[in-house]
């Protein structure tokens, strides 16, 4: 099927909306749009960051997920207490594959689950005593932890516990940062507010810790990688490119990151933001308070990598700029070989994306490098500024969908018939059973890294092995196949 | 009276960012913008108007300031 025209796309949206009751239809219509590159501001065509309608299937998470799961969780040498009932911590444990190096349970704690396991009596009488005891216990069992963060689950806000008081008391007693984070799950409309709350907690409790401490030797080429969660090793494959350019990566936020790295970040020369949605808040704060400029970059696919490397180098002197060119030149043969190998197998394939807050626009370049076309994209929890940046990346008359419901997504896919869908685990099995190749783009479907030149090779291979997998030809039961189809394999084998 | 962070973008224009409102707009014009003071009526590219009492000497950007709605 050829690409849809603007009218066809608009008609498709109308058709999909038809089943909703009047009020729901009116609300959902604001979240679905046909991309128009001439629109300067996304708020004119699409509404985002609004409460999901009760009754529809949304795949959004909660503020706790945004804070503990995304921002704080990957900080490896701190212990993150899931304060409240046991489930939140158990189900968010280690599923995101943010890799780190260290001895788990000795000096790093990334894949462990610490929880205060609230019972009825804690809800009735308050959980502060339990939290206090828990922190003392942690200190006894894991003395090498560098700090503790208290990630509130819903009941903490509902019963009005004073976790800040406990944190202050214990911080003094242990002589370590103990950070209370008010990220109760019911706050906000999605995990996005959790990112903001987590950023604010870092601002208030971490960033200023080394103010006035000049013992850290600053260099002229210090940078911090912000908003890279090292999923499948993403931050590592990004970091080597920056280091080859001659930059010194002082901190990784927060994949494979440590508390002291975060404390040192205000002393760098430039903050590099990968995930704009989850960490722009802290970058803006550092720019205002410490005068550290920040820039967004994109390490998906060689075109965007080269663009980003040159832009990063633009902040530094000629040596770095020359090095950037050397790095690009060094990897050219490597990525050209990958494109030569996979592009013929993937050329012209259509992709629909629906991911969190960054990848729906960041990976477009990588698909285009492979000759693929993104025909629809959307975010779970993006804001207007994300759509502002998306409109330019997407082709005209493509679909944009915000906080898409399960029903809408299925209907769009039935009509648009993409060759590949990139979305999350909740969508994966539905679409695979519909016979459509699918990649899980939150945790790279247990693969990765996808960042950097090394990651691009893996990305291309993964897309190829998904789309060109022979299983997609076996979707029909043999007795339902027509006689010709049956004859074909026999003829081939004969 | 929202808290607004004013910063310069790559092109050198001033950006008007309200975190709570999830709003980032470019400033089209500022009533008073000279070596002495900065402020007064501020108009954004989307047509909305805001007001701040002139600050003297002009603040160094980026900075966070409290603005009033200029419509009323």
Image: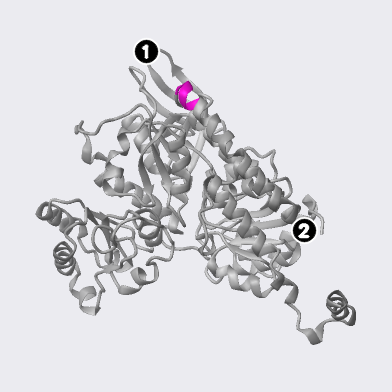
Residue A162 vertical position relative to residue A258 in the rendered view, above or below: below
* Residue lying at the far front of the rendered structure: A494
Which range of residues does the magenta coloring cover? Answer: A317-321
Residue drawn where x is 61% and y is 50% of the image: A46
Q: Give the color scheme: rainbow, by chain, secondary structure or one colour.
A: one colour
Can the viewer see residue A443 in this picture?
Answer: yes
x, y (%) of residue A253?
37, 47
Q: Which mark is residue B36?
A: 1
Secondary element at tag 2: helix
* Residue lying at the far bottom of the rendered structure: A479
Q: Chain of mark 1?
A: B
x, y (%) of residue A328?
57, 35
Residue drawn where x is 42% and y is 52% of the image: A229
Q: Which mark is residue A11?
A: 2
| Position of the C terminus of chain A by quadrant | bottom right
Is residue A170 found left or right of A107 in the rendered image?
A: left
| Position of the N terminus of chain A by quadrant | bottom right
x, y (%) of residue A214?
21, 31
For the residue pair A90 and A454, the one nearer the viewer reads as A454
Residue A93 vertical position relative to residue A346 in the rendered view, above or below: below
Residue A84 vertical position relative to residue B50 in the rendered view, above or below: below
Is residue A138 magenta-colored? no
For the residue pair A261 and A386, the one nearer the viewer reads as A261
Separation of marks 2 and 1 at Cα, in angstroms: 56 Å
Secondary element at tag 1: loop
Predominant secondary structure, magenta span: helix
């Amino acid at each position: 099927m050829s690409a849809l025209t603007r009218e066809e796309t608009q008609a498709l949206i109308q058709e999909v909306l038809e089943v909703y009751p009047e009020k729901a239809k009116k609300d959902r219509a604001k979240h679905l749009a046909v991309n128009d590159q001439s629109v300067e501001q996304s708020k004119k065509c699409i509404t985002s960051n609004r409460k999901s309608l009760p009754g529809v299937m949304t795949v959004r998470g909660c503020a706790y997920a945004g804070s503990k799961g995304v921002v704080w969780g990957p900080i490896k040498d701190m212990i993150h207490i899931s304060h409240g009932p046991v489930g939140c911590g158990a189900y968010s444990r280690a599923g995101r594959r943010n890799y780190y190096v260290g001895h788990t349970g000795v000096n790093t704690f990334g894949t462990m689950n610490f929880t205060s396991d609230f019972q009825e009596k804690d809800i009735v009488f308050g959980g502060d005593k339990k939290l206090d005891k828990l922190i003392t216990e942690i200190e006894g069992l894991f003395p090498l932890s560098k700090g503790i963060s208290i990630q509130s689950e819903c009941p903490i806000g509902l019963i009005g516990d004073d976790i800040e008081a406990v944190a202050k008391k214990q911080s003094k007693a242990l002589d370590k940062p103990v950070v209370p984070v008010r990220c109760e799950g019911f706050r906000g409309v999605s995990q996005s507010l959790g990112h903001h709350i987590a950023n604010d907690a870092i601002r208030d409790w971490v960033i200023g810790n080394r103010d006035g401490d000049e013992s850290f030797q600053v260099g002229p080429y210090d940078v911090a990688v912000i908003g890279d969660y090292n999923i499948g090793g993403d931050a590592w494959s990004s970091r080597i490119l920056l280091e080859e350019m001659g930059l010194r990566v002082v901190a990784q936020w927060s994949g494979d990151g440590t508390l002291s790295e975060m404390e040192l970040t205000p002393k760098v020369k430039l903050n590099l933001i990968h995930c704009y949605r989850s960490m722009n808040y802290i970058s803006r704060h550092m720019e205002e308070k410490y005068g550290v400029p920040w820039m967004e970059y994109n390490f998906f696919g060689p075109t965007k990598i080269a663009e980003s490397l040159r832009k990063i180098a633009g902040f530094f002197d000629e040596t770095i700029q020359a090095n950037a060119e050397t790095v690009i030149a060094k990897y050219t043969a490597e990525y050209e070989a990958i494109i030569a190998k996979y592009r013929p197998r993937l050329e012209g394939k259509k992709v629909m994306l629906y991911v969190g807050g960054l990848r729906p626009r960041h990976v477009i370049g990588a698909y285009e490098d492979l000759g693929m076309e993104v025909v629809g994209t959307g975010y779970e929890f993006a804001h207007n500024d994300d759509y502002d940046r998306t409109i330019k990346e997407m082709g005209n008359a493509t679909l944009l969908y915000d906080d898409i419901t399960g029903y809408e997504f299925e209907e769009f896919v039935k009509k648009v018939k993409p060759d590949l869908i990139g979305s999350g685990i909740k969508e994966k099995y539905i679409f695979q059973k519909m016979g459509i190749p699918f990649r899980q783009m939150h945790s790279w479907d247990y693969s990765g890294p996808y960042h950097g030149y090394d990651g691009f090779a893996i990305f291309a291979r993964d897309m190829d092995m998904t789309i060109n997998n022979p299983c997609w030809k076996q979707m029909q039961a043999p007795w339902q196949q027509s006689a010709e189809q049956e004859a074909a394999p026999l003829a081939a084998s004969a | 009276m929202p808290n607004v962070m004013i910063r310069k973008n790559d092109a050198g224009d001033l950006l008007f960012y309200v975190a709570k409102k999830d709003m980032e707009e470019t400033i089209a014009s500022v009533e008073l913008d000279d070596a002495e003071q900065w402020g007064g009526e501020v108009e954004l590219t989307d047509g909305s108007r805001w007001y701040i009492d002139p600050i003297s000497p002009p603040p160094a950007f980026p900075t966070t300031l409290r603005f009033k709605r200029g419509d009323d």
